Structure formats: structure tokens, C-alpha cells
Amino acid sequence: NAKTKGRNSFDFYHKNLDIFSKERLGLEHDLRQALDNKEFIIHYQPIINSKTQRITSVEALIRWQHPSKGLIQPLDFIPIAEDIGIINDIGAWVLLKACTDLKAMQQLQPQLKMSVNLAASQFNAVNFVEKIAEALLAAEVSGESLILEITESMLIQDIEHSVEVLHNIRAQGVSISIDDFGTGYSSLGYLKRLPIDNIKIDKTFVEHIHTDKHDCDLTTAVIDMAHSLKLNVIAEGVEQQAQEDILSQHGCEYYQGFLYAHPCGVDDMNSLLQGRIEGELSINPGNVSNL
Ligand code: C2E
Ligand code: MG
Ligand code: MG
Ligand code: MG
């Protein structure tokens, strides 16, 4: 009857909530120890210059090597780290580790740049600009070799403040990419005011660019707009040659995606830069060091 049914479904729901919160609490607990336990690793993915087909930069993408659950992807723990207030510590670790790894990679390719994702609370921290300077100094890399990836939503909350912070970051030679462009609040008005360098077209647009006229038109409009603002365009999630062909026709400057390389560990990245990996990756590594 209805009463029993109601009671049962309540119990069922209650149990599920319980399982969810236990799982979540467990992850939160483990995440708080992960930095101390050195469980984070960074994978690097090349960004390719469309003209030379060579690697110009690599993006640092964090993963969590959980002791019992295996490798956890960033979208499954970054939001939790944000919620429990430890994302700035993790972000500081990523920045220093990525810059340190870049220092080694530059032995193989001196012009290589490192692109690092930022969380909103890192960008909004009062000492953020000094943190960047400290990391560059500690890793002994120049500001010119660092790119910071910031999303639109992080910048539009307080445009005046964002303009000032971006200005101070760029005064150190560091450049700025707008990540996941097209998924947020895209407005020409604010883009024009922001001191930035590159736009990364989100992979959800690139995905159908070769099969869907609407997505193709949108993407080419974004490329044209970026160029009229003197910004470079990086296409994310390029998986097929047909996608690259269209991007190339419309003057997209940089490509990133599985077509060129999957994100990989620092040792594999160094091998790739050294030209020791052949066949598996379609970039011509022999040319990389001549960039
Ligand atoms: P993102 O910055 O937009 O990074 C690009 C994502 O696309 C990466 O996912 C990458 O592995 C994936 N990707 C690259 N090429 C392709 C492709 O051809 N096809 C497809 N389907 N995917 C491709 P990942 O590594 O899972 O990272 C997800 C997001 O997590 C990142 O998106 C970024 O927003 C965030 N993230 C990663 N590392 C950090 C970090 O150190 N700090 C912060 N705050 N966020 C990070
Ligand atoms: Mg990114
Ligand atoms: Mg992105
Ligand atoms: Mg994305």
C-alpha cells in the first residue's frame, strides 16, 4: 500500500544519500592528505603551431593517483578541492611543478612554453601576482615562457579588478589564454577590454566542426572575431584531420588534441621532445628542437 511504499522509497533514498555522503566524505578526507602524500601528478599535452606543425607549448593537466581508487581525473576532484578550500594549495603545487618540469624540457627545446590552468580562487587571491613571480624565480624560467589559462566566468565577475590583475601578470611577460571559449558569457564588449593574448575554442565546438554547418560557422566567427581583436586562436579537442583542415582554412594558429598527442607523463613528454617516440604520435619530433 501507499504508506509502506512511501516509507520504503524514503529508506531507499536515505540510503543512497548516505552512500553518496560517505563516498564524498571519504574523498574529501583523502584529498586533504593527497598533497602531503605526493599523490598528484601532471600530464602534459602538446599544443601545435599550425604553420610549422611543431610543438610550441604544453598544457599541464593534473591527475590524482589515489592509493586504492586508481587515477582520478581533474573534473572528479577539482570541484571538491574548491569546495573544501584547498584548491589554492594544489594550484600553487601545479604551478611550481609545471615550471620546474618546463625548465628541464627547455634543455631539449629552449623556446617551449608551459600553459597552466587556474582556479577562480587562485586568480582572486590578494597575493596571486607575487605567487606567479615566486614560482618563476624558484623554477628559474622566464615569464615569457608561462601561459595562464583562465575561463571567462572568472574574469567577468569584476572586470575592473580582472583588468588590473591581468595587467600585472602580463607585466612579468606572462601571457593569458581564455579557456573553454564559447561555453560561457562571451561578449565582445568585455573581451575588447581585457588584456589577453589567446582564445582557446572549446572542444564541444571543434567536435562537430566538420559535420555540422552551424558549429562550423560559429567556430569561424570566433576565429575572425579573435583576429580582429589581435588575439591568437587555439583549437581544443582536435581529433580528426577533417577538423584540422577546416581550422587551417580559417587561419587558426594552434591545435591541441588527440590527433597530435594524448596528455602524457613528464618522461614521455621529454622523450617526445627528444624525438625518441616514433610512430605512435603523429607530430614530427625530429623538427621539434629546431623551433
Ligand atoms: P581544459 O583546461 O579545457 O583541458 C582540456 C581537456 O581536454 C583535458 O581534459 C584534456 O585531456 C582533454 N582533451 C585534450 N585533447 C582532447 C581531444 O582531442 N578530445 C577530447 N575529447 N578531449 C581532449 P582533462 O585533463 O580531463 O582536464 C579537464 C579539466 O580539468 C581541464 O579542462 C581544466 O579545466 C581542469 N584542470 C586540469 N588541470 C587543472 C589544474 O591544474 N588546475 C585547475 N584549476 N584545473 C585543472
Ligand atoms: Mg585548459
Ligand atoms: Mg579548455
Ligand atoms: Mg575544456
Image (cartoon, rainbow, N blue to C red):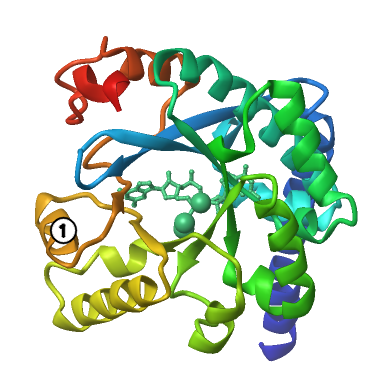
Provide residue 103's location: percent of width, then percent of height.
Answer: 57, 19
Provide residue 163's location: percent of width, then percent of height.
Answer: 71, 71
Q: Which quadrant would residue 225 be assigned to in this image?
A: bottom left
Residue name at image x 49 percent, y 86 percent: 188
Quadrant for the C terminus, please: top left
Q: Indicate whether 212 appears above or below 82.
A: below
Residue name at image x 19 percent, y 23 percent: 280
User: Is disc 1's CB within 8 Å of ligand 1?
Assistant: no
Provide residue 168's location: percent of width, then percent of height.
Answer: 75, 56
With 94 as the anchor, is 111 left or right in this view?
left
151 and 68: which is toward the camera: 151
Q: Is residue 214 visible?
A: yes
Residue name at image x 31 percent, y 51 percent: 254
Type of the residue with mark 1: Ser
Residue name at image x 76 percent, y 62 percent: 165
Quadrant for the N terminus, please: bottom right
Q: Indicate whether 254 appears above or below 143.
A: below
The number of discs equals 1
193 and 245: which is toward the camera: 193
Provide residue 49's location: percent of width, then percent of height.
Answer: 28, 43
With 226 as the anchor, is 244 left or right in this view?
left
Residue at disc 1, secondary structure: helix
Q: Residues within 10 Å of mark 1 (few under 14, many from 20)?
A: some
Report the residue marked by disc 1.
Answer: 248
220 and 93: which is toward the camera: 220
Q: Is residue 68 visible?
A: no
With 92 as the anchor, is 142 left or right in this view?
left
With 56 as the anchor, is 34 left or right in this view?
right
Q: Indicate whether 64 appears above or below 177.
A: above
Q: Which quadrant would residue 182 be assigned to in this image?
A: bottom left
